[in-house]
Image (spheres, grey):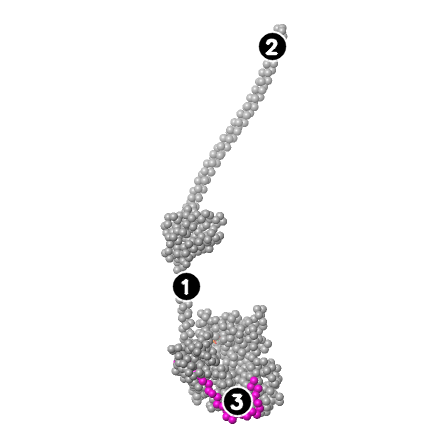
Amino acid sequence: MTHLDRLAQERRARLAAERMLELKQAELFAANRQLDRHAKRLSEQIVETRAEVVSVRNENARFKSDLTVANQKIALVERRLWHTIETIQDGFAFFDEQDVMIMANQAYLSVFDGLEEVQPGVRYSRMLQLLTEEGIIDPGHLSPRAWRAFMLSRWHSEAPDPVVLRLWNDEYIRVIDRRGPGGEVVSLVLNITASVANEQRLRDAQERAEAANRAKSAFLANMSHEIRTPMNGVVGMAELLGDTALSEDQRLYVETIRSSGEALLVIINDVLDFSKIEADKVHLHPEPFDLERAIQEVARLMQPSAQAKGLALTTDYDPYLARRYVGDPGRIRQVLTNLIGNAVKFTAKGHVLVRVSGRANDSGQMALDIRVEDTGIGIPADKQEMIFGEFSQVELDSNRSFEGTGLGLTISRRLIALMGGEIWISSEPGTGSCFGIRLALPPADHEPETAEPARGLRGISRALVVDDQSASRAQSVQALELLGLTVQAAATGSTALEMAAPGTDLLLIEGFPGGDDPAGLAAAMRQAMPGLATLWAVADLAEAQADAAACGFDGVVQAPVTRHALLDALSHLSERAAPPPQGAPASAEPQQPKPLDVLLAEDNATNQLVFRKMVDGLGLTLRIATNGEEAVAEVARLRPDLVFMDVSMPRMDGKQAARLIRAAETGARLPIVAVTAHAMREDRDGILAAGMDDYLTKPIRKAEIKRILGERFPDRYAEVAEAAARTNTGRFGEESSGRKP
Ligand code: ADP
């Protein structure tokens, strides 16, 4: 290799080296630049990070201070809450869902009387155990185990009922537990000792008040009894005195004594009834009864007072309306007596009309509408509600002269309300009043007819009514027409004799028309028309039964006349008409009937005398026993036909005597009629339960005794009374009976 070649080779090598160097330098340069950029980015990142760190640090510091504040707040609230919970006097505790106590205030823990075991951490079941084992609670009638079981099952129910516990020291607590959705329980314990004591005091007070009320009722019942016994003497003797020969003045005095006595009895009954209603002691005694008859009976009782004032008292019972219903007839009569009595009392002229209608309602009952209309003084609109309040009367010049307690309407309204009905009023001063009763009663299932029409009416198609009172005459005509008869009517006997058409089968004479003697009129008519049946309509049926027969009437019917009363009378009439064969030899001597043998058991000498005098002339043999023991002995010895038995007697009372008589009885049942001064319904039930058949309340009245005798011995008593009447002077029975308004 030449030098040149070597030079050239070296040069090339140097050039290549230089190029390489340049290349490397360029690469280095580029790397340097990249490094530069990287370093720059890094330093930027460091700056950013540093700023971030600063801000995070700041934030952290802020958080820390917030947390402290929050913690402080929580602590404060907790302190306050606990303070509050500790301050309230009721026990408060909190249990977790495992029934473990989380916390409880002192009031709660104090129930456990310092037992250290009872504190947060204790289980509910353990607490129950401690309560029984340590005798802290009184489990009452439960055993401790049963009590714990009861409390635990209650605790585990979803919504436990509050429970009242009695503690060992006679304090009472009410425990109220609420279970939350997570199963935890908040328990509240309230000390209710004071309110329990209060309740007890109230109960005691109520019991005392009820006892006082019972004592009041007993006192009133007793008073009524005590007053009735002497009143029996007063009213009875006045009645007897009225039957003796008296001057005009004396008769007036006697009648005043009698009517004042009766009025006093009405007042006693009102006060008694009112106090019973007040004490919720009035109970209804529903039974099937005849509404039309009940109304007729009340109207009949009022008839004498109405007639004395010249008022027409009539009834209008819808002929198509059923008569028998289930209700309390005694109470319904009482209300009607009050309404009709008021109507008569507050009416000076015109009429009093009782109307009854009704329609079936949806529940199968009859909605009855009973109205008592009068043409009296009326009641101003602003007083119409007031009169139903107790002791309230309309104080007007026009009615200051009327007596009364002001209790009647109060009692009536309450009684009707008790039956589910209502009383209403519409009235115009000077024109009249209408008191109405709206009352729904179930019809009695069975409607017995008093008589079979065909039987009663056999052969009778034309009737003649003689009555001088136009209202009652019209009612009788209507009743007869409803039975399908052709009817004529006359106001006096002489007109009747003139107008009687041939073919008249029935003559109905009411009272004493125009002062005529009814017996003479009947006899004259019968002479003119042989075969004529004669009926006498009288206000008091029981009274007149014997008299009617003695006067030659074929039958009597109760006034005011209704178609049912007529059916009754006509059926008896056809029974009697099945006659002894014509021309049968009349017995030469009328046989002397055996007198009825009556025993009266009564300890009070005045009442014995009253009774003895009242039955004087009735043709009875009367014996007297002065107590129950004697009565039992006399019944065994004498076998009387009938016993009147006073209920309250020394040694043995009437009920006991009746029981003994019944126990010893072998043959026919002896009628025993209680005589009692107890006028209350409940007494009646006791009397009947003792085996007596009927009862009379004191003061007893002659008419009542006659009624009983007539009912019990319809044939014998009529004969006996007739025989007695023949030997007596035989005045027609003109005594009135019953309550007068
Ligand atoms: P009493 O009749 O015993 O005073 P009531 O309670 O029966 O008591 O009646 C209260 C009052 O209502 C009567 O005093 C009378 O002022 C008035 N009153 C009741 N019924 C009538 C009537 N039919 N007409 C006018 N006023 C009446």
Dividing the picture into quadrants, the one containing residue 28 is top right
Q: Residues within 10 Å of mark 2 (few under 14, many from 20)?
A: few
109 shown above or below 525: above
527 or 311: nearer the viewer: 527
* Res 221 label: none
Asked if residue 591 is among those painted magenta in the image, a careful observer would answer yes
Q: Secondary structure at mark 3?
A: loop
Q: What residue is pinned by disc 1?
A: 203
243 or 709: nearer the viewer: 709
Closer to the observer: label 1 or label 2? 1
* Res 551 label: 3
Dividing the picture into quadrants, the one containing residue 363 is bottom right
Specify the principal SS of the magenta part. Answer: loop
**Is residue 585 among the parts visible in the rendering?**
yes
Instruction: Specify the quadrant that holds the N terminus.
Output: top right
**Is residue 273 among the parts visible in the rendering?**
no
Asked if residue 405 is among those painted magenta in the image, a careful observer would answer no
* Res 10 label: 2
Closer to the observer: label 2 or label 3? 3
- Image location of residue 351, percent across then percent down: 54, 80
Type of the residue with mark 2: Glu
675 or 523: nearer the viewer: 675
81 shown above or below 364: above
Q: Do the residues bearing badges 2 and 3 touch, measured as CB atoms within 8 Å?
A: no
